[in-house]
Image (cartoon, rainbow, N blue to C red):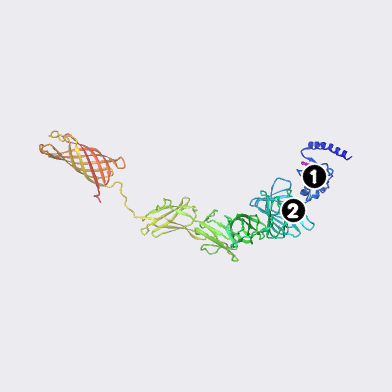
């Protein structure tokens, strides 16, 4: 009979599968009993690996809820297997969350049971059974269970929450699975235990504080018991179930478990570092953010250190945490908001065991607002800007008295300290105040020349540019007066006046006035040179030159004679420059003729010429000459004669040394006589005969 029933059932299976395929890709279970009027049902799609007990545990809050699934879905007699894609009708129930996300810093996500999509976790949200919580890099999260037990997730940590369940009838067992990362547990109730499972171990914790780590890469987990009851550590099998005897890890000790191996014998935790004392109050600029600094004494067993900055003395909400290597014994935390913080540092040895944190050092952070002088926000503190202290606090810098509004008048480095009403003084804050650069725009070392007795206009470049409404006052060295004419994008325009009492190198100091006082904006060392006026050299200055001339007559001197032909001559020349191009020249020459005759004789020529010069290069001139000529002949064979004629010629001139070398060719003629030609070379020295 039983065999017949199985045969009938096997015949119905293909029919049911065909019917499900015709209805669609999802198949509903057999019609269920009618739901109660106050119960709302919803569809649940069966996934691979699902069972009624597993679905009930995730969706209804208890594995015993499988009876409810059977109530609303006709799944046939037991045992039965759920096929992926089947749609079950489940009642909506008001489930109590297993934990609450008390706080989150950075990027924290969650994932519901049997889902693959992560969602953005929000502070205060409910976390239910089998949900995952993931704190990404540089992120933290705090989960609080129903019994107020706490799990603090560090960065890059994934935890699966299972919530409380019955244990041994005496205590509730709160269960969580650490897939990867690091967390700190704090058990608040003695009637509860916390079971943390990793891929390689199972750890049962009692009251106290414990740090647990797990690595997917190495499949290794560690437990560092800081305080409270002992921790029972067991090896886990491939399915994550506990196996073997428990190793008890007392407070102050730690152990580690590698995949497939029993827990190591517990050892002492490394000692905590000693934080160096620092001021309780720190101040920072609101525009640049807080940079919190600290240091500690090194620990011999350290492989690395872990620094945590929390908002509570129990380091429950960690706002900044990072690890450094063993050779680093200081830290800087940036991006903190104003408020009170607690800083601690722990030692991590070469086994991965972590010491209890050092005593928490309280630090209060206050922000100073920056008010620029010209109203525009600047990344750098400029000269003349102000620092505004929080209410109830005063600040001082350099020699300034304590004040709620600190004016930064002096350019360069400045150290600011602030004080609360109770007398608590802040740690020094080092700042760099940017001054204005005002300078003469010429070449480096070039001086702005002032002429005595005359006003000179100067344009000074300013970086950064000053607003046109800036109030400036000038203070100059003795013998120099200066006043501002205008201020614009091109710079500061001023008029300066030098007297005979001014020094060769003078300076002008520029002050700027504000509501809080006057300050030195810049000292401009212009190397102002007071120059005594000198008469300018006229464009054409009279010039006198004297020199020697030598040459030769190139044509017959007379129509007749014993030695007609060429004759050399020597002479002297003087010239007076009328203008840059015109000269008047006087020349006297003596020639010797008849060298082959028994009795040679002499003759002379005197010329008064007007010369014109045209430059053709840096030191070359083209010359032209014209003027009367006086001729005197003392030939014994001919009666002594004197004649007057006209001469004209051209030549070249080149300036050499203190004078000029000239080459000339002349042609001249006398009334009733033939013309004459001669060539000459002369050098004339410039002689200042007029001064």
Q: Which residue lies most toward the bottom here?
A: 422
To which quarter of the image does residue 601 belong? top left
Q: Can the viewer see residue 528?
A: yes
Closest to the observer, 30 or 469: 30
- According to the picture, the residue beneath numbered tag 1 turns out to be 89
In the rendered image, residue 85 lying in the magenta stretch gets the answer: yes
Sequence-first disc among 2 and 1: 1
- According to the picture, the residue beneath numbered tag 2 turns out to be 244
- Percent position (x, y) of residue 455? 39, 54
- Percent position (x, y) of residue 680? 21, 39
Q: How much space separates mark 2 and mark 1, taking CA atoms?
A: 42 Å
Estimate how packed mark 2 is, as few (under 14), some (14 to 19) or many (20 or more) residues with alpha carbons within 10 Å: few
To which quarter of the image does residue 275 belong? bottom right
| In this rendering, position of residue 346 left or right of residue 494 | right
Q: Which residues are magenta?
A: 83-88
Q: Which mark is residue 142?
A: none
Q: Can the viewer see residue 223?
A: no
| In this rendering, position of residue 344 left or right of residue 67 | left
The number of numbered discs placed on residues in the rendered structure image is 2
* Label 2 SS: strand
Closest to the observer, 421 or 609: 421
Closest to the observer, 42 or 256: 256
In the rendered image, residue 358 lying in the magenta stretch gets the answer: no
| In this rendering, position of residue 591 left or right of residue 204 | left
* Label 1 SS: strand
């Amino acid at each position: 009979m039983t065999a017949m029933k199985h045969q009938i059932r096997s015949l119905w299976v293909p029919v049911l599968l065909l019917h499900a395929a015709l209805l669609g890709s999802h198949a509903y279970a057999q019609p269920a009993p009618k739901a109660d009027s106050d119960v709302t049902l919803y569809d649940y799609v069966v996934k691979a690996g699902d069972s009624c007990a597993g679905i009930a545990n995730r969706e209804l809050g208890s594995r015993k809820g499988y009876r409810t699934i059977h109530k609303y879905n006709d799944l046939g007699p037991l045992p039965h297997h759920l096929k992926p894609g089947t749609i079950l009708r489940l009642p909506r129930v008001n489930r109590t969350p297993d934990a609450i996300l008390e706080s989150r810093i950075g990027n924290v996500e969650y994932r519901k049971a049997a889902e693959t999509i992560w969602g953005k976790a929000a502070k205060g949200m409910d976390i239910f059974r089998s949900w995952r919580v993931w704190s990404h890099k540089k992120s933290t999260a705090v989960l609080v269970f129903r019994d107020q037990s706490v799990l603090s997730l560090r960065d890059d940590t994934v935890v699966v929450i299972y919530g409380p369940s019955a244990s041994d009838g005496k205590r509730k067992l709160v269960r969580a699975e650490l897939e990867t990362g690091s967390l700190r547990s704090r058990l608040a109730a003695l009637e509860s235990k916390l079971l943390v499972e990793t891929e390689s171990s199972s750890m049962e914790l009692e009251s106290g504080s414990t740090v647990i780590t797990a690595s997917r890469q190495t499949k290794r987990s560690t437990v560092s018991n800081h305080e409270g009851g002992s921790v029972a550590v067991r090896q886990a099998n491939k399915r994550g179930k506990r196996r073997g005897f428990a190793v008890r890890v007392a407070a102050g000790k730690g152990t580690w478990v590698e995949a497939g191996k029993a827990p190591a014998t517990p050892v002492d935790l490394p000692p905590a570092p000693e934080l160096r004392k620092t001021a309780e109050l720190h101040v920072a600029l609101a525009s640049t953010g807080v940079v919190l600094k600290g240091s500690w004494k090194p620990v011999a067993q350290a492989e690395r250190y872990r620094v945590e900055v929390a908002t509570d003395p129990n380091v429950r909400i960690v706002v900044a945490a990072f690890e450094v290597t063993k050779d680093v014994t200081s830290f800087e935390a940036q991006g903190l908001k104003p408020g009170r913080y607690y800083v601690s540092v722990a030692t991590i040895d070469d086994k991965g065991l972590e010491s209890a944190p050092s005593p928490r050092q309280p630090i209060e952070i206050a922000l100073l607002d920056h008010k620029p002088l010209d109203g525009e926000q600047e990344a750098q503190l400029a000269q003349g800007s102000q620092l505004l202290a929080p209410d109830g606090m005063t600040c001082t810098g350099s020699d300034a008295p304590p004040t709620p509004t600190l004016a930064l008048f002096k350019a360069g480095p400045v150290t600011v300290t602030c004080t609360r009403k109770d007398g608590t003084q802040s740690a020094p804050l080092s700042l760099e105040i940017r001054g204005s650069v005002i300078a003469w725009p010429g070449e480096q070392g070039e001086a702005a020349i002032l002429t005595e007795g005359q006003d000179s206009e100067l344009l000074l470049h300013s970086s950064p540019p000053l607003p046109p409404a800036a109030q400036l006052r000038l203070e100059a060295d003795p013998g120099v007066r200066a006043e501002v004419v205008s201020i614009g994008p091109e710079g500061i325009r001023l008029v300066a006046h030098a007297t005979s009492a001014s020094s060769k190198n003078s300076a002008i100091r520029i002050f700027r006035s504000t509501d809080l006082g006057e300050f030195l904006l810049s000292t401009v060392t212009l190397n102002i040179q007071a120059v005594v006026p000198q008469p300018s050299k006229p464009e054409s200055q009279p010039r006198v030159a004297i020199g020697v001339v030598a040459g030769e007559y190139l044509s017959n001197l007379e129509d007749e004679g014993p030695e007609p032909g060429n004759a050399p001559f020597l002479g002297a020349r003087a010239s007076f420059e009328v203008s840059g191009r015109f000269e008047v020249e006087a020349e006297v020459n003596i020639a010797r003729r008849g060298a082959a005759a028994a009795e040679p004789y002499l003759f002379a020529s005197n010329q008064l010429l007007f010369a014109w010069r045209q430059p053709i290069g840096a030191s070359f001139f083209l010359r032209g000459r014209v003027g009367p000529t006086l001729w005197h002949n003392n030939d014994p064979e001919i009666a002594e004669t004197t004649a007057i004629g006209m001469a004209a010629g051209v030549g070249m001139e080149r300036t050499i040394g203190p004078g000029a070398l000239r080459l000339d060719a002349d042609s001249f003629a006398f009334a009733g006589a033939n013309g004459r030609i001669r060539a000459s070379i002369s050098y004339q020295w410039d002689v200042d005969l007029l001064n």
